[in-house]
Image: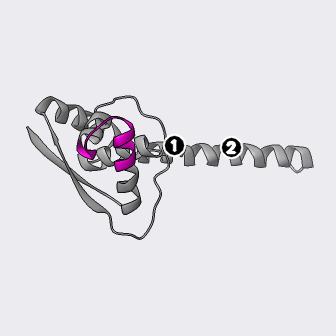
Amino acid sequence: MKMIAFRLSDDELKFAEHNAILSGFTSINAFAKHNVLNIETKPVNIPVNNEPAKLVSVRLYPHEIELVKRNAALHGMSMSREIAIRVRQSLLKTEVCLYPDEVKELKKLSTAVDRVGRNIHFIIKGER
């Protein structure tokens, strides 16, 4: 078995404690482990603030670590970042959280939509 650690802000830690209890888990570690190994993900926004994050440790079995490694590699992130994002996704269900590659794709899409909008504007104005 290997140990994996990641940091949470005070607010995230309170959310984790609350959600762990509501979900029937006796500890944040058990709650985090359960949610990290849940392969399906939904986008959730990760709030950014200037508070230093707090360290949280989780113990996983080797096969669970392999699942986390695989998902981290798929998203181009470290294992701790993958775990932190998955925990945040489970805590902040009403907000949007995107992986870095998804943010890049959305920026490209936004640029393409802007370009189409400018072209339509010029066509309507008769300048092209």
Image marks 2 and 1: residues in contact by CB distance under 8 Å: no
Q: Position of residue 8 (x, y in %)?
A: 33, 57
| Direction from residue 10 to residue 68 in the image, left or right | left
Task: Determine crowd level at label 2: few under 14, some 14-19, many 20+ residues with C-alpha closer than 10 A.
Answer: few
Q: Amino acid at mark 1?
A: Glu
| Residue 98 placement, left or right of 4 | right
Which contiguous range is marked in magenta?
16-29
Foreground residue among 11 and 69: 11
**Residue for point 51% across, 43% down:** 105
Q: Label 2 vs label 1: CA separation?
A: 12 Å
Q: Residue 69 lies in what quarter of the image?
A: top left
* Left or right: 70 as drawn, with respect to 85: left
Tell me what residue is drawn at x 25 percent, y 49 percent: 80
List x then y, in percent, for residue 98: 47, 44
Which residue is under mark 1? 105
Q: Is residue 23 magenta?
A: yes
Q: Secondary structure at mark 1?
A: helix
Image position, residue 70 (x, y; %) = 25, 33
- Quarter of the rendering occupied by the N terminus: top left
Q: Which residue is mark 2?
A: 113
Q: Percent x, y for residue 33?
A: 25, 38
Q: Amino acid at mark 2?
A: Val
Residue drawn at x 35%, y 44% as measured from the top left: 87
Q: Is residue 55 magenta?
A: no
Q: Residue at x 47, y 42 (%)?
A: 102
Q: Main secondary structure of the magenta part?
A: helix
Q: Nearer the viewer, residue 42 or 108?
A: 42
Q: Examine the rendering and report whether any part of residue 94 can be seen.
A: yes
